[in-house]
Image (cartoon, grey):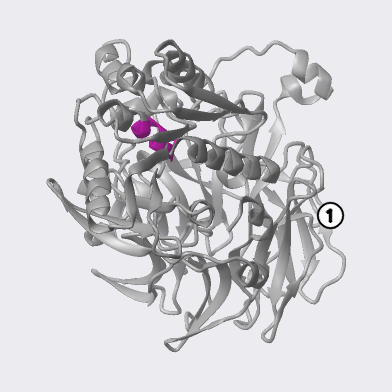
Amino acid sequence: MQPVDVGKLRRVWDPRIHPDGRRVAFTVTAVDLEGDRYVSEIWLWDGESARAFTGGPKDTSPRWSPDGSHLAFLRAGPEDSDKPQVAVIAADGGEATVMTEFSLGVSALEWSPDGTRLVVVGTTWTDDWADLEDDERKRRPRRITELPYRGDNQGWLHDRRSHVYVIAEDSEPVCLTPGEFDEASPTWHPSGDRVAFISARHDSRGLDPGSQLFEVSVDGGSAAPVGDVGAWDSVSYSPDGTLHAVGHTGMYDWPGVTTLFRRDGGEWMDLTSQHDRGVSGFSPPLVPPTPQWSGDGVPVGYLVDSGRTRVVRFEGEAAVTLVGGDRMVTGFSARPDGSALAFTATDYSDPGELWWSENGEERRLTSVNEGFRSSVSLVEPEEVTIDTEDGPVHGWVYLPPGDDPVKVLFNIHGGPASQYGVGMFDEFQVYAGAGYAVVACNPRGSDGYGRDHVRAVVGEWQKDDPVDLRDLRGFIAGVLDRYPRLDRDHVGVMGGSYGGLITIRILAVDDSFTSAVSERGLYDWISFAGASDIGPWFDKLYVDAQLPDGDQDLWRASSLSHAGSVATPTLIIHSDSDFRTPIDQGQQLYVLLRRLGVETELLWFPGEGHEMSRSGKPRHRVERFEAILDWHNRHC
C-alpha cells in the first residue's frame, strides 16, 4: 500500500435494517483525492444487490420510518460551510425533501414510534450571534463565561446551543429543551409521549466529565433528571419502555469498562460489567453505539475484547456471541424479530463491507472495497504475546515479504484507553508497503483487556518508570529477540496523542531508537489544563492531580520534564486547529529539542484538528504519510 492509496478506501458504516427485515440502508464514504474531500452517500441493499440510493455528496445517518415507507437521513451541501439538515425520501426512491433549516445543522435524528415526527438535535446561534454576518463573527471579541468554550473538530461552542427538537412535515420545529444547556443523544419512549436525552446541567459542568440523563414530555414542560450525574455515552429504551444507558454511573469511573445499565426501581442495574469488557469503544468508532433488541426483548450489543469487537446477546449473566471471529465489527442492525443481523466489519485484509448473519451462517452483501483489495497488496501480521518481566503483552508484527533483514517501526496508539486490533489499518499497511516491519501492541492502559488493565496507568506517569513504559519496552525487546529478520540497529518509534506523550518518555530512557515521530502529543500537563477542550478535568482522570496543589505531580507527569535526555532525531507533527492537544504542545517540544541540539523538525498542518490522520483533508493525510516515511528513510 502506498500513501496515495488512501484515495481508494471506502468506509462502509451505520447499517439499518428496513422494518420488512429484508433491505438494509447504510452509508458509504469515499475519499476524493482530486477534490480533497470526502463524499458520502446512502446505499441500499435491496435483497439482491447494493447500489447508491442517494446522490450525496454528504448524506449520512439513514433512519427508516417505523412503517418502512420513508427513509430519513442527514444531508449537507458540497461546501465546508454547508451544515447537515434532515432530509426524507420515499423508500422506493425519488427526490428527497429537506425538512430543517437549523443555522448550524443537525447532529442526531430518530423517528417517533408512530412515524409522524422525528426527534433531532438542532444547533443554532445564540441570540447575541444569530444576526451577524460571517465576517463580523470573525472580527467580534469573544466574552467567555463558561466551559467548555470550544471543542476539537467543532470550533467555538460558547456562541451556539444544541437543543432537542421535534419536527414534523409542514410545521415548525418544536424545541423541547430551551435554555442555557446543550443536549445530545435523544431517543423516544415506545409510547411516543416523552424523550430521553443526555445533558450536563450540574453546577460544576465543564470542570468535570460529568453528564446526566433526562426525560421530557413532548407536550412541553421541564425536563426531569433520571439518576445522579455520571459519565454517559448513549441512552435508549427497551421495547417495554425500560430506560437503558451506556457509560458510567460515576463521572470519574473512566478510564474503565464501559457498561450497559438498566433503570430498575429508581436505581441503575449493572447488566454487563461481569464480563470485564467494554460495550463501546473508540477505535474503530462503533455506529450505532446503543444496544438493540432481540425479538424477546433481550439487549444485543458490542463487547470490545483483546483487539476484537464482537456482537453479543446479553442473556442474564452470559454474553452469547452472535458475530465474532478475528475481526472488528464496526456497526450492526437487528431485524425487528431478532432473527438476523446486518453488520459492518473489518479484518486484516479488508477495510470493511456489509455482511448478513442468519441461522448461524454469514454472507457478504457488498463489494464496495473490491477496487482497493484488487489493486493493493496488503501484509497480514503475526499476532504475538510477549512475556515481559511484568507479565504478558499482546500485539502484532507486520513483516514485509522476503527474507532480507528489515528496519523496524514501533507504533504506539493514542488514548491510552484505545486499542490496536485485527482490522485493516492504513497506517500499518503504508509503512509495511514501504519495506518496514511494523510492530504494535496494547500495553497497560489500553482498552479491551478489563478494568484493571485499562486503569493500570492512573497515577503512573509522574513516576520515573510507569507501567505502560515498561510494557512497551519489554514488548519491543521481546519482538526483536523473537524475529531474527528485524534489524535491531535500525528501529524507529512513533505515536500520536497519548502515543506522542509516551514516545518522548521512551526516548528519554532508551537511546537505541534511531528515529522518532511524535504526533499531536500531550507534553505539558500544566498548559494542557488551561488550553485543551478536555483540560479542566482530564488531568484528574490520569494523573490524579490538579492545579494549584498538584503542580509538581503534573510537571513530573509531563514529557517535557523528561525530554532533556532525548537525543534521537525527532519529527514533531501537530495541527493548528487541534483543540484536544493544542499546537502549543508541539511548539514547546520543538523549541526544547532545538535548544538541546537534537535534530528535529516541526510539521505544522493548517486548519486540521486532532483527528487529522484519520479524517483530515485527504491531501494532508497523503502528505503526512510522505513526511513520516521521508523522516524514517533518512534516520532509521
**Horizontal and vertical percent position of residue 330:** 50, 62
Residue 499 belongs to magenta span: yes
Q: Quick check: can you spot residue 587?
A: yes
The percent coordinates of residue 417 (x first, y second) are 35, 44
Find out whether residue 420 is within the magenta segment: no
Residue annotated with mark 1: 170
Residue extending furthest toward the right = 95
Give the camera-side residue of 567 and 453.
Answer: 567
Residue at image position (46%, 66%) is 348
Residue drawn at x 87%, y 65% as measured from the top left: 95
Which residue is nearer to you in this view: 390 or 481?
481
Of 242 and 317, nearer the camera is: 317
> Could you tell me residue 241's position as x and y percent?
45, 63
**Which image quadrant: the N terminus?**
bottom right
Q: Please say if 85 is above or below 124.
A: below
Q: Is residue 440 above or below residue 94?
A: above
In the structure shown, which secondary structural element does the residue marked by tag 1 occupy? loop
Question: From the image, which quarter does the C terminus lie in?
Answer: top left
Residue at the front extreme of this rendering: 404
Residue found at x 35% / y 23%: 567
Residue visible at 53% across and 52% down?
A: 434
Q: What residue range appears in magenta?
A: 495-503
For residue 380, what is the image quadrant?
bottom left
- Asked if 305 appears above or below 314 in the picture, the reply is above
Q: Tell me if 290 is positioned left or right of 151 in this view.
A: left
**Displayed quadrant of residue 145:** top right
Vertical side of 185 occupied by 11: above or below? below
Determine whether, in the image, residue 251 is placed left or right of residue 592: left
**Whole-percent x, y for residue 207 in the image:** 41, 24
Q: Amino acid at mark 1?
A: Asp
